[in-house]
Image (spheres, rainbow, N blue to C red):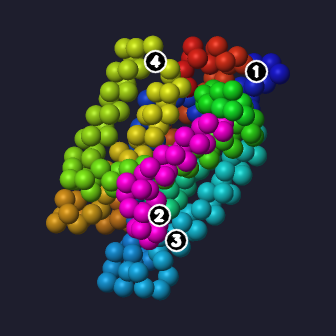
Amino acid sequence: MTMDARDTLTKVPALTLGFWIVKILATTLGETAGDTVSMTWLGETGPDAGQGVNGYLVGTVLFGVPLALLIWAQIRARGFSPWLYWATIIASTTAGTTLADFATRSLGIGYPGGSVLLFACVLASLFAWYRATGTISVNSVVSPREELFYWITITFSQTLGTALGDWVVDSGLGYGGGAVAFGGALLVLVGLYFGTSLSRVALFWAAFILTRPLGATVGDFLDKPMVQGGLELSRPIASAVLVAAILLLIWLLPQRAGRHPGGEAAADQTGA
């Protein structure tokens, strides 16, 4: 297959500053939208929580079905579509929010247990991907097999981010402190990217995973009660504003498919 042919099959966006801005907004939306359904509409934080239908489980199904359909559409697509890609990302982060809440709260394994379990799932997905293809670089996502690994890993990482964010907040840092901690960790990764020769693939996945708890803590800061350290904004309104911002940025910022060199050596040179 020629380089041009491989590029036409690319459905993963280039890793630009615009990508990371939209990614953080999408993870924040995942938190507010997931909480809107499971907590506001299905009553998981109301006086009747725990009685009758489990809102976290229902929310997971409501978001999980569209996620599966969007992943199927993404894999079937002939080329990169920013609208389809970001819709799939948002579906994964909203489903991840309700799934993590179901695991940590309804199943009773707690934030530490949920974070450790989901981190193991991320590592297992990356390991299986590497064993099957020889690389976990997003520069290799040029066929349905690699793309399926990509979306499985992303969905696990989005779910991990919710549990990890809640764990850090619950440990005493609070929503603002958690956001500062994860934001600071991302800045450290930026410094490592520009100041060292560490693996770009490893740095990408570390940054991708950390954007999720950052979004989770910011989302919680926006909609949680003031007595808990939040701003107590309306979850549906906050979600609508985030949707509008994401749509505007996708329309305004350049959205292009990433380069996918044919060789692993080239992939290492260009980064994840």
Residue type at numbered disc 2? Ala
Left or right: 85 with respect to 110? Answer: right
Where does label 2 land, which residue?
103
Q: Would residue 241 be seen by someone viewing this image from the given angle?
A: no
Q: Label 4: state its secondary structure.
A: loop
**Residues under numbered marks 4 and 1 in contact, where contact means CB atoms less than 8 Å apart:** no
Q: Which residue sits at x=35%, y=51%?
A: 165
Q: Nearer the viewer, residue 267 or 120?
A: 120
Compared to residue 151, the image places residue 44 above or below, namely below
Q: Where residue 198 is drawn, which disc sits there?
A: 4
**Residues under numbered marks 3 and 2 in contact, where contact means CB atoms less than 8 Å apart:** no
The verdict on residue 120 being magenta is: yes
Query: Alpha-carbon distance for marks 1 and 2?
Result: 44 Å
Where does label 3 land, which residue?
57
Please provide percent x and percent y for residue 259.
Answer: 63, 23
Q: Would residue 227 be seen by someone viewing this image from the given angle?
A: yes
Q: Label 3: state its secondary structure.
A: helix
Query: Alpha-carbon distance for marks 3 and 2?
Result: 9 Å
Please provide percent x and percent y for residue 190.
Answer: 37, 25
Where does label 1 land, which residue?
4
